Amino acid sequence: MNKLTRLLAGLTIVLLSLSPVAAAQTASLTILHTNDTHGHLLPFSYPDSAASGRELQGLRTYKDIGGIARRATLVQRIRAEQKARGVETWLIDAGDYSDGTPFSIEYHGEADVAAMNATGYDFGTIGNHETNNTMAQLRRLIAQTKYTLVCANAIERTTGKPLLQPFVIRKVGPVRVAIFGLLTKESATYPAAKEAFDVTAEIDAARQTVATLRGQADIIVLISHAGDDMDQRLADEVPDIDVIVGGHSHTRIPSGELIWHSQDLKASSVNGTVIVQAHQWGGELGRLDLLFAKDETGAWRVDRYRARLIPVSADTPEDPGVAAVVNQFWKPIAPRYAEVVGQASGEFSSRGDDLAEYNLMTDALRESTHSDFAVENMGGIRAPLLKGTVTRGDLVTLDPFSNTVVTFKLTGKELRQVLQRYAPAVSGIRYRLENRTLVEATVAGAPLDDNRTYTGVTNSYFAGYAIKGATDVSDTKKPRLDVLIQYIRDKGTIRPAYDGRRVVVNDR
């Protein structure tokens, strides 16, 4: 959605808030929401360079933010305020609560579930990173979850039944509100899904579920771990969905998105699907206030809404009970992850195409294996690295996965195909992609030679799907994280590389 469309949607909110309610009978609901918290149970900070970028514009506080114990305090305050006004409040999570910090490495989602239970979540779905466990561990997480999980498109192979209940229906005053969930189709490649269940197409599953809900519910809310692009498609193609609480794409939507069903302005309906998403890591708490009213036909509709993101900042005290749960998991592992590995002379973050945190990893892999080049998949580095002391915990947050280091050989022609198809982070290579076409590339300063064989290195995940036709492939079995840690120890002080080695123009 472009800036003009978002502006028009915002103006629509104002106009709707001024319009008269067609029916005297109304009901209200407040939805508080999170997504993609990725193990960030404790407060964190963004680097200055990231905070000044477009993605975080409008975020007033970006140092020492987040933390689920602070979030719990905000939730309790809002619940109490709304209860006093006679308004029901739901707390919803849109998945990917695991994979991202030492909590995830040590507890595989169980610390997150315990803290979310203590916070008082009402509904949620699972994300692809919850399925980055064995099926047995995913079942443990589901069994430990005290709030209601919904997902309509994860189907167990042995039984043909849904892994989770597809939907639930709750009353908000006289209004029947259905809540269903969807998981991104990308999850089909993750361990638990490979082992035990299929993930059906999001739009097909949404159509089938909404068809089932017609006649049973007045308002339909989707908890979607499918990403903002897919959420917009769902709103367009399955218009009976009234609200989508989204996740997966880590999209920051400060005032919500409105996907129009028609260009008509109606006094008793927003005439579209409202989409909200709260970026990542729990730095902000999403809030969506909904007013339901009956239209001229007697059907309940979303008459008005207001969406916003509330900073979870240091001036919010921690809830003692939730803090105690977090500390129960943190205290035994804190000494290990407080270990100092080295020093960072500057911030390792992304500045356009200059990806210093990725450059750090690729440089570490290339130098440690004495390879001609290193390549890394985008999305494989999960956090920036701040200036100052570098701890093991910082590096686990940067690389929370269990990938190992894989070496191989590729011809220049094959390497050209990898660069063009995947636009990876690199070391030992400089290249430029325009409109998905490789227009220039060098290795060690010399033009890429299609007929030459080069030695390369990457992580086991990327090697598994992207390095085709390689020879002398060897999984060293060394964890990528351990190689990075040793690299930093050897250097003592690391310096961010913003050197323009990867330029990608018009990637879409």
Image: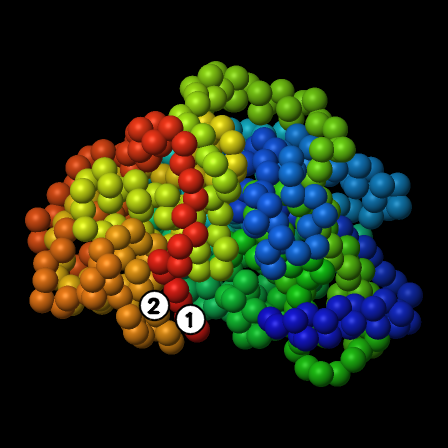
Q: Is residue 74 above or below residue 309?
A: above
Q: Give the quadrant of the C terminus.
A: bottom left
Q: In this view, does 259 lie above or below 153?
A: below
Q: How far apart are marks 1 and 2 (CA)?
A: 8 Å
Residue 1 x/y as whole percent: 60, 71
Mark 2 Cα shell of 10 Å, populated few (<14), some (14-19), many (≥20)? many
User: In this orientation, does residue 339 appear?
Assistant: yes
N-terminal label among 1 and 2: 2
Name, please, the residue furthest toward the front: 445
Residue for point 70% across, 55% down:
58
The residue indicated by pointer 2 is 432
Residue 73 x/y as whole percent: 74, 33
Q: Residue 225 carries which label?
A: none
* SS at badge 1: strand
**Amino acid on which the number 2 mark rests in the picture:** Arg
Q: Who is closer to the viewer here, 155 or 184?
A: 184
Q: Residue 505 carries which label?
A: 1
How is this picture coloured?
rainbow
Residue 47 x/y as whole percent: 57, 43
User: In this orientation, does residue 403 appear?
Assistant: no
Mark 1 Cα shell of 10 Å, populated few (<14), some (14-19), many (≥20)? few
Q: Is residue 7 left or right of residue 34?
A: right
Q: Who is closer to the viewer here, 339 or 251?
A: 339
Q: In this view, does 227 lie to the left or right of 76?
A: left
Residue for point 43% across, 52% down:
498
Q: Are marks 1 and 2 in contact (CB under 8 Å)?
A: yes
Residue 4 x/y as whole percent: 68, 75
Q: In this view, does 411 lie above or below 340?
A: below
Residue for point 24% across, 63% down:
442
Q: In this view, does 107 lie to the left or right of 429?
A: right
